[in-house]
Amino acid sequence: MTSVTVGGAAKRIAGANWLPLVAVWAVLLGAPLWLPLLGGYTALAGRVLVLGLAAIGFNLLLGFTGVMSFGHAAYFGLGAYGAGLTLKYLAASTPLAMLLGTLLGGLAGTLFGLLIVRRRGVYFAMVTIAFGQVCYYIAYSWNDFTGGFDGLRGFQRAPIGLGPALLDITGDGPVFYYFLLAVFAAAVTLMGLLLRSPFGRTLLAIRENERRARFLGIPVERHIWMSFSLSCFFTALAGTLYALLNNFADPLSLHYSLSGEIVIMTVMGGMRTFWGPLVGAAVFVVLSDYISSMTENWMSFIGLLFVFVVLFFPRGILGFVARRDQG
Amino acid sequence: MLQLVLFNVTNGLILGAFYVLMALGLSLILNLSHVINFAHGNFLALGGYLAFVLAPYIGFGGALVVSPLLAGVLGFIIERLMIRRVYNRDPVYSLLLTFGLAFIIQDFCRFVWGPNGLPLGVPTFLSAPVNPTWFFLTWYRMSMVVIVVAAVAALFAFLRYSRIGVRIRAGTLDLDMVGGLGVNVGMLRSLNFALGSLLAGLSGVLAAGQIGLNPNMGDELLMPSFIAIIVGGVGSLTGTLFGGLLIGLAAALTTVFYPAASEAVIYVIMMVVLLIRPRGLLGEEGMLT
């Protein structure tokens, strides 16, 4: 009797492991096919992917390390500006733009992380907000170089040469979407492997009980710093994709309101789950797209969404589903 | 040159006074309830708009007293209805909640009073300059500084001598212990939130008399207030006071010598403080960590 139950449970867990994966990838791969049927467009799907990647990267810190940053727009925006500036001033090379943008955002986060890694809770959050505003302020006031308030224009994503072949991602069609999806897939695979590694398990241990982790001899500060740094690299990569997607880098992509949006996507999707942030990004992007086309008072609706999620739905969509499965 | 420096020092002190008033309210809520109130700037705007509505009936002086009180009552209600539900949860929830509230209040102001700027009339004798050579020093700006100083003094006296004030300070150090001694901690937190909102409303009325009203008038003051708290040290109200004055003066003096960097300088100060004294100038180690 017991063995049957255990076997059933094991089967259910195994099923639970691969079924969502297949579902997620099937939905993502098929997006250009089924989106037009729902009246959507590929650019919207691209935005979901990009913000989803940013939120998944952010969730390495919030959901899997238990540390709250409220300034991740800074690294997202630095990635976007890094990519845009590379394309505009340095070379018309998409891979180089992505590399330099990711490095800019990631390294800025790594250095800044050194300053704040001993802080916790709301204080950590407050300092990350303020640092985010430093980046916003620089992009906003350095008119000649960054385009100031109007944003950085005048660059275009370039085709990628793959040996003899040329991958033309300059159009808005499915080719560019699949390019985004490929980068997204590579990044989330890396993230999944990181979380399964001993390093990832250590982060979970710190999240669950920081003091115990410290007593076990884990260098807590160094791990939090590394987690912060890694999540900045992932978010910055998403930022470079954002610049490529829009052919534009916007100072608002550095502003703390975007940080808030990244946080709400993560929480709304379920911050204790791997795919939650992507689900949250999809819901948030589609919903805000719809609301802002319907009413001038979209801010109230977005604000109400924040309040609703916090008060009545704190586990998020996938957290809710997972809990119901257990029950 | 002397006049220019004096002009900017005056500006800096006035700006600093605003940062202080706003940051003290934020700091009160942060210290006792560990909530960063993103909607603080919107309470400021509400205070200003309430004064705009009330001034025709009760005059500017009356509005200066009544609208901060109304802002305080509103803060009390919002705390009772929403904020208190997130106290014992991950800090991410309180941040998201006040963030959403900020959106809602800002949109409400835009919906009711329109997106464009509105003037708040101040009595004519206040808008005259004190002295023709120092044309920039109007009576209004003078009385603004006096009011801020009086408000800050009253706040510190309240916290030092009144029963509730003492409990708020004790709760900042150890809220569980204060509760264990029989204090109604829930009510204490509500009153404290109301007090913070009242300070925001007062800054709103004063700011509206100087720069007029618009729905996002609090946003520009929010970030300097955060920085005033970080520079002064989280957990210390005196630190917030000096932090606000310091960054206000620094911003104004930079305007004299290198105008382009006048906003950057407050961020530079913050980074330097984080680098050499991470707990802030007057902060105590171990607060809110």
Image (spheres, coloured by chain):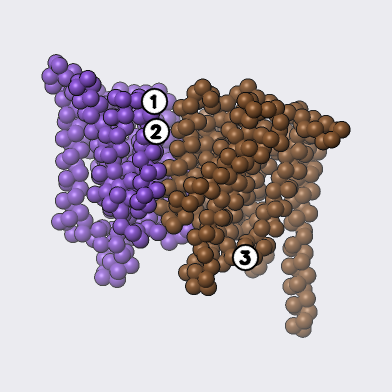
Judged from the image, the secondary structure of the residue bearing numbered disc 3 is: helix
Report the Cα–Cα distance between label 1 and label 2.
Answer: 8 Å
Q: At 64% from the left edge and 65% from the top edge, which residue is drawn?
A: A198
10 Å crowding of disc 2: few (<14), some (14-19), many (20+)? some
Report the Cα–Cα distance between label 2 and label 3.
Answer: 40 Å
Chain letter of mark 3 equals: A
**Residue A187 visible:** yes
Residue beneath label 2, please? Answer: B264
Q: At 63% from the left edge and 33% from the top edge, which residue is drawn?
A: A83
Residue beneath label 3, please? Answer: A201
Pointers 1 and 2 in contact (C-beta within 8 Å):
yes
Q: Residue furthest right?
A: A164
Q: At 63% from the left edge and 58% from the top edge, which residue is drawn?
A: A273
Specify the chain shown as brown: A
Judged from the image, the secondary structure of the residue bearing numbered disc 2 is: helix
Quadrant the C terminus of chain B occupies: bottom left
Residue type pointed to by label 1: Ala
Query: What label does residue A114 carry, if any?
Result: none
Query: What label does residue B260 carry, if any?
Result: 1
Query: Is B93 displayed left or right of B276 in the figure?
Result: right
| Residue A314 in picture, x, y percent from top left | 53, 56
Report the Cα–Cα distance between label 1 and label 3.
Answer: 48 Å
Judged from the image, the secondary structure of the residue bearing numbered disc 1 is: helix
For chain B, the rendered hue is purple
